[in-house]
Image (cartoon, coloured by chain):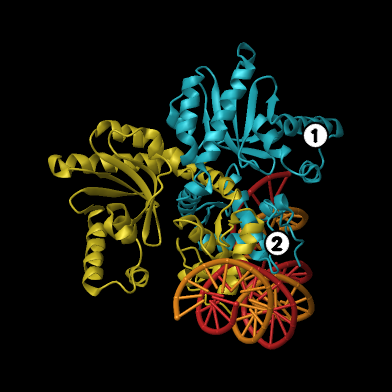
Chain colours: A cyan, B yellow, C orange, D red
Amino acid sequence: MPKTKARNRTGAPRPAQPNEGLMGGLECLQALAGAPGPVGSREMARALGMEHTRVNRLMGTLAALGLAERTPERKYAAGPALHVLAAMSLRGSRLLSAALPHLEALRAELPGLTVALGVLWRRQVVYLYFAPPGEDSMVAIAHRNLYPAEKSSIGRLLLAAQARSDVRKLYAGTPAAELDELLAGLDAAARDGWALYGGQTLGVAVGTPPVAGLAVAGKLDERDSDDLLRRLRETAGRIAQGLRPSMQR
Amino acid sequence: MPKTKARNRTGAPRPAQPNEGLMGGLECLQALAGAPGPVGSREMARALGMEHTRVNRLMGTLAALGLAERTPERKYAAGPALHVLAAMSLRGSRLLSAALPHLEALRAELPGLTVALGVLWRRQVVYLYFAPPGEDSMVAIAHRNLYPAEKSSIGRLLLAAQARSDVRKLYAGTPAAELDELLAGLDAAARDGWALYGGQTLGVAVGTPPVAGLAVAGKLDERDSDDLLRRLRETAGRIAQGLRPSMQR
DNA sequence: CCATCTGGTGCTATTATAGCACCAGACCCA
DNA sequence: TGGGTCTGGTGCTATAATAGCACCAGATGG
C-alpha cells in the first residue's frame, strides 16, 4: 500500500477514486525529465521515497510506452515518445506560444538585461524562456538548466502562492535560519506581488493564481525600478490575457 | 477489466507487471493536450474507446494534479501543471534545443521555403517548429495546429517506420483506395529515406529509428531536389547528432 | 573471490480498480 | 412546464491489478 503522494495543485477536489498508478507514474516521469542524466530505478526510488519495485514497474511501463529508454548502463533515459509528449503538452499548455511575442518585445525594451519565463517544479525553476543579453533569441528557448527556486525571484513568487505548510514540507531539512529567511521573503512577495532576489533579479507572477513567473535579471540598480515593475506587470498581464479561456483554441 | 491498449513504441519489452492506470491516464492526458478545446469525460471516453467511468476517474486524477482543469461547462481543459509538464518534458526531450540552431541555419539557406520539425501523435503531426517564409522565427515555435499525418511528408516518414499492421489499425475505416495509396507511399518512403507529398513538401527522418521529421515546403519544383535533399539530410544528421547519449546533459 | 550494488521477476495477499447502477443537473423540444 | 436525453460524478462490490517480499543474475570494486 503506497503512501498517497497526491498533492492537490489547483484546489480541484480529489475524485472519489483517484488513480494511484497514474499519480505514481507521472511523478517518475517528471523525475526522469528533470534528471541531469540517465537514472537507475533504485536511485529514482530513493529520490522519490518510493518502494523500488514499484518504481521499477512504473519505469518499465514508461519504457514500453517509449517515454523512457533503457541504456546499456542499465539506467533509464528519456525515450522518443518524450518528444511527442513535449510537443503535445507545449501545444496544450499554450503558455510559450502566448508568451513569446511579449517576451521578445520586453527584451527589446530592456537591452542589457536577461529576460526569463519559468515555472515551478518542486524546488526548482524550469525555464521555458531564458534570454541573456546579446544572445540569440533561439538559444533562449528550451533552456536546459533547472535553478533553485529559493534563489530565484520567479521561484520565490511561485512558492509564495503555496500554503506555507506545503513550503515547509518541501524544504524539510533546510537549516532554520535559511527557512525563516525564505518564508519571510515569500510573505513579502505575496504582499507586494513582486520579488527581488539578490538585488539582481526582479520578478512578477503570470496569472492569478500564478501559473508561471516572469523576471528580468542583471544590474537592476542602474534602472528605475518602478518602470521595470510596470513593464513586467504589463507583460505578465498580456501573457495571462493570451491564456484566457475566451481565447481558447 | 480494461482491454489492454499499450502499444510498444520503441520495442522495449513490456515489464512483467505493467501499470494499467499509468497507461490509461497518459492516453487521456495526451488526448486532452491534443484536443481543440475543453472536452467532456464521456466525450473523451468515446473518442478513446474507453469506459466512461474510468475516463472520469483518470481525468479527475489529472485535475487533482493540476494537469487538467474543470470548466464552468463541466468539461476538462488544460490545467496549470501542464505548463510544468511542458517545460519538463521539453527539457528532458532536448529535441527542440538540439534542433533550433540547425533549423534556423537551414531556414537561412532556403529563403522562400517553409521549414518544419514535427513528431507523430496517432494520425497527426505535431510541430515543434513550423516557420513559413517571412514570418518571425519566434512564431515558428510552439505551432498550434495538428496536421493529418497522411497528408504530410513528415507524417508519412514517421508512419513509414511503423509496422504496416499498426498503420492499418491506425487507419481503420479509411477507404481502401486511400489506404492503399498511403501504404504505397509509406513503402516508398521507407525505401528512399525521404518523402515527397503533393509536390510541395519534402521531408526526411531525424534519428534512426526516426524520432521526428524534418521538412521543407513551398514551390519545390523551382529547386534542385538533390540539393534540397542533401541539405535536409545534413540538417537531420546534425540534429540527431545533438541528441546522442554521448552528449547527454 | 567476496561483498554490495544493480535492474528485474515470481508469487500471493492485499487493495486499488472497473463497471454497473444510480444520482443530480443541464439542456432541448414540444 | 414536463419529459427525454445527455452530462459529470459517486457508491458499491466483485475482480483484477498492484505492492512488496524474496529471490535471481549481472555488474562493480576492493
- Left or right: B64 with respect to B247? right
Q: How many marks do you count on the picture?
A: 2
Disc 1 is placed on an element classified as: helix
- Left or right: D19 with respect to A79? right
Q: Residue at x 56, y 29 (%)?
A: A234
Front-most of A92 and A29? A92
- The image shows residue A201 at horizontal and vertical percentages of 64, 24
Residue type at the position of mark 2: Arg
- Compared to residue B150, the image places residue B207 above or below, namely above
Tag 1 and tag 2 share a subunit: yes
- The image shows residue B157 at horizontal and vertical percentages of 30, 56
The residue that mark 2 highlights is A14
Name, please, the residue furthest toward the right. A176
- The chain letter under disc 2 is A
Please identify the quarter of the rendering in which residue A158 is found.
top right
Residue A145 visible to the viewer: yes
- The image shows residue B126 at horizontal and vertical percentages of 40, 52
- Compared to residue A163, the image places residue A80 above or below, namely below
Q: Residue at x 53, y 68 (%)?
A: B14
Front-most of B80 and A236? A236
- The chain letter under disc 1 is A
The residue that mark 1 highlights is A183
Residue type at the position of mark 1: Leu
- Compared to residue A227, the image places residue A80 above or below, namely below
Disc 2 is placed on an element classified as: loop
* Image quadrant where one finds the N terminus of chain A: bottom right
Q: Residue at x 47, y 20 (%)?
A: A134
- Left or right: B23 with respect to A19? left
Name, please, the residue furthest toward the top. A222
Residue A156 is marked as none
